[in-house]
Image: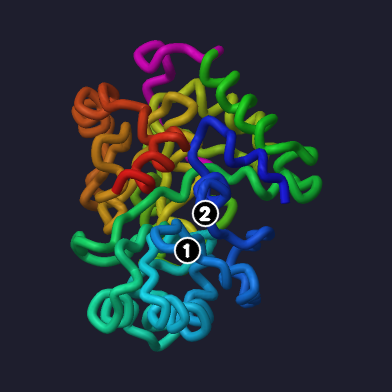
Amino acid sequence: MNEIEKHCKYVSSRGIAQNCDVFPPTIKSDTMTFNPLYYYDIKQGDKVYVITSVLHHFTKLILPILERKNISIKLITGACVKGAPCEISNFHRINYIERFFINSKSITYWFTQNYDYHKLYNKIIPIPLGLDYHTLQKNIHWWGPKQTAVQQDNKIDQIYKSSHSFYERINKSFSFYQFQMFNRHGKDRYLANDALKGKKFNIFLNERLNRNTTWKLCSGYKYIISPHGNGLDCHRTYEAMCLGCLPVVRSSSLNLIYKDMPVIILNSWDSISPELLEKLAEQKIKNSRQKLMLKYWVDFINNY
């Protein structure tokens, strides 16, 4: 595995995983394969990363060992499109809130991506999906040639630093989510499409382009439309922020993550207008980029 991702500037799922004390050497999104050997040497207070899709295997095979040894840990989950704690509990037929926090003392906190609980639960802490550095590390892709995580990290930073300031950019929203239309999460992309159809303040990308070209185009606009994807959270949202844009999302359980970040949150896609975007931008553009940084989340988990 390319562990260099742990040293990247911007947050990513693998970057968070590789800064944990215990994590699988190969992180494959949505895997159904679980090797318990990676989890037999867990120590008191360790930060333990588990791919959300195999959380049931961890719960059945490893958690009882921790309980017998009276070991408590911080659990971190991600690299999966399914939401947590609700969707994954239903999918695995395990009430994880009850199993971890009522029937056990071995999970002190649970940090998870794609947080889908309707309110904040005091021991489950939402963490961001962040950027996708793993796809191009594996092989060439229509996004572009094979690249290391650091090369990708440096590229998005370079594009941001060479772009105009927010107030000098094209005062329109830019959309390129429409090339993949998912049915999950209330068909959010279809709802966004309906709301933006024929609107002169929004520009739809005409054809799918490689990622670097798309990033450069994004950096010329103030706003990037970012509905939910196959998972609740979306890499595009973080790419937009890294590029100095304001991503526009619909209100959801992810609001807890986006707090204090430069993100515009709409109650519904139907409410979108140039006037509303401009009004909300005045509040949001001043928000810090600190929560885009991997170091912020590593320190956050370490010190929680």
Asked if one can make out residue 289 in the rendered structure from this viewpoint, the answer is yes
**Residue labelled with disc 1:** 43
Residue occupying the point 36% across, 75% down: 70
In the shown orientation, is residue 277 left or right of residue 111?
Answer: left
* Image quadrant where residue 282 sits: top left
Given the image, on which type of amino acid does mark 2 rest?
Asp
Q: CA distance from mark 1 to mark 2?
A: 9 Å
Q: Residue 248: percent from the left, percent from the top?
A: 35, 40
Q: Is residue 60 above or below residue 267?
A: below
Numbered disc in front, either 1 or 2: 1
Q: Earlier in the sequence, mark 1 or mark 2?
A: 2
Q: Residue 95: percent from the left, percent from the top?
A: 32, 83
Residue occupying the point 42% across, 77% down: 69
Q: Which residues are magenta?
A: 162-177
- Judging depth in this view, the residue of 149 and 218 nearest the camera is 149
**Residue labelled with disc 2:** 21
Q: Is residue 240 above or below residue 186?
A: above
Q: Is residue 290 above or below residue 54?
A: above
Residue occupying the point 49% across, 40% down: 11
Tag 1 and tag 2, C-beta contact below 8 Å: yes
Residue occupying the point 47% across, 37% down: 294
Q: Dot 2, crowdedness within 10 Å: few (<14), some or many (≥20)?
A: some
* Image quadrant where residue 111 sits: bottom left
Callout 1 secondary element: loop
Asked if one can make out residue 177 in the rendered structure from this viewpoint, the answer is no
